[in-house]
Image (spheres, rainbow, N blue to C red):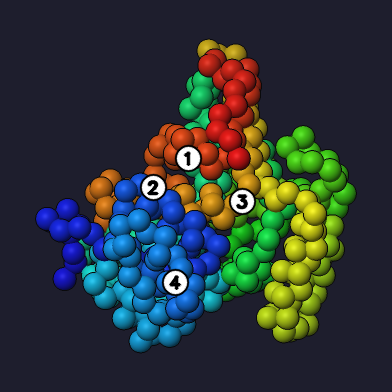
Amino acid sequence: MTRNPTAGHKPRIGVLGASGAVGRAAVRELRALGHTGLRLGGRTASALREIAEQDPTGQDETVRADAGAPDGLRAFTDGCDIVLNCVGPTYLLRATVASAALAAGAHCVDVAGDDPAAEDLLKDGDPARDGRTVVLSAGALPGLSSLLPRWLAGQGLDSVSALTAHCGGLETCSPTVARDLMLSLTSGGAAGAAYGEALAAVRGGRRVPRALRAAEDTEHDGFPGRVAVQPYLSGESERLAGVLGLDRLDWYNVHPGPRVRALLNLLPASLAAKDDPAELADRLILAADLDLAGRRPYYVMDFALSGTASAKPATAGLTLRAASSYRLTAAVGALAVDAVLRAEVRAGVHFACDVLDPGTVVRHLRSQGAAELRLTGTAAGAEQMEEGVL
């Protein structure tokens, strides 16, 4: 039976992967939103206890849980009203956690999930039939990467026609991010299709293969120093182009660290040769640590929109700079949980960018000091401004 969190009892929120980089930040975000009595799940009991001890109300509980162990996952989801999944890798788990939450009569928010999880869930029947809600891609990228351009499009532009995006940063690489980064291009979607297409872009409102080129050593105003840029059109970005009615979309993943860049160039051949993925992930984590040594971590999302305002050509730009993409992911995930519990998201399977209010997300990031946002452009009302602190 599906639980109704508004039916007179305090909802139980389960955070799976609570001891990871995203999970720890998500717990803090949920507490800041006023949610207490969390169920913290993970594989390391001591780490979970440490996080629970930071709860000022003393109401958090810990449950040992492994997303790859069905029995432990069932024990964790049982009794939850909603589960926030902060573990991966996406290509391997797909809809595993969401399915376990639904089986326990709970809603689910997944900071990743992406198209493969949606395919699995809808293949097994729409959760809306039982009044349950699943929100996928509730993170930084995907998630915030589509919410911010949607917000920007409303800042003085009457219509939009083109978007150029640059997203990336210099920070530690978690095991989940390493595995997803390696394998997202070679597995995941329907019939093994990739999550998106490298070098592709939107032209004339349609995907065009090999429309762009990678640059191994270049500069961009939003990023300090030399960087590599790799064009990549994801499923989320392609949907964004449709929602905004874009004629043209260029999307670039940005890699500032030279050691990570060098390793990424070798990964396709290494994966094709069936090298050990665990060893490759370890190498990627080490490369990120070496690139970060002695430097301050950062993450940047830079968007440039062009269109019209008052029947004249106009532009609007937004640069977000944060100390960590993990905190951004946690913030979006926590806001999605909050929206579901407030019954602001209808039952069914959704992507976060389609159901969260972009303005609410931007206001939260500013008010919590999670990011610095700079808005520029010629569109009406798009005066230069900086809000929030790192």
Residue occupying the far left of the picture:
8
What type is the residue that disc 3 sits on?
A: Ser
Point out the tag, 1 or 4, that comes first from the N-terminus: 4
Alpha carbon of mark 3 to alpha carbon of mark 1: how far?
Answer: 14 Å
What type is the residue that disc 2 sits on?
A: Ala
**Are circles 1 and 2 on residues that touch, CB within 8 Å?**
yes
* Circle on res. 368: 1
- SS of the residue at dot 2? helix
Point out the tag, 1 or 2, that comes first from the N-terminus: 2
What type is the residue that disc 1 sits on?
A: Gln
**Nearer to us in this view, 315 or 192:** 315
* Circle on res. 324: 3
Q: Nearer the viewer, mark 1 or mark 4?
A: 4
Would you place residue 269 above or below residue 203 in this image? below
Alpha carbon of mark 4 to alpha carbon of mark 3: how far?
Answer: 22 Å
Alpha carbon of mark 1 to alpha carbon of mark 4: how far?
Answer: 24 Å
Point out the tag, 4 or 3, that comes first from the N-terminus: 4
Alpha carbon of mark 2 to alpha carbon of mark 4: how far?
Answer: 19 Å
Q: Which residue is mark 4?
A: 48
Q: Which residue is mark 2?
A: 32
Residue 151 visible here: yes
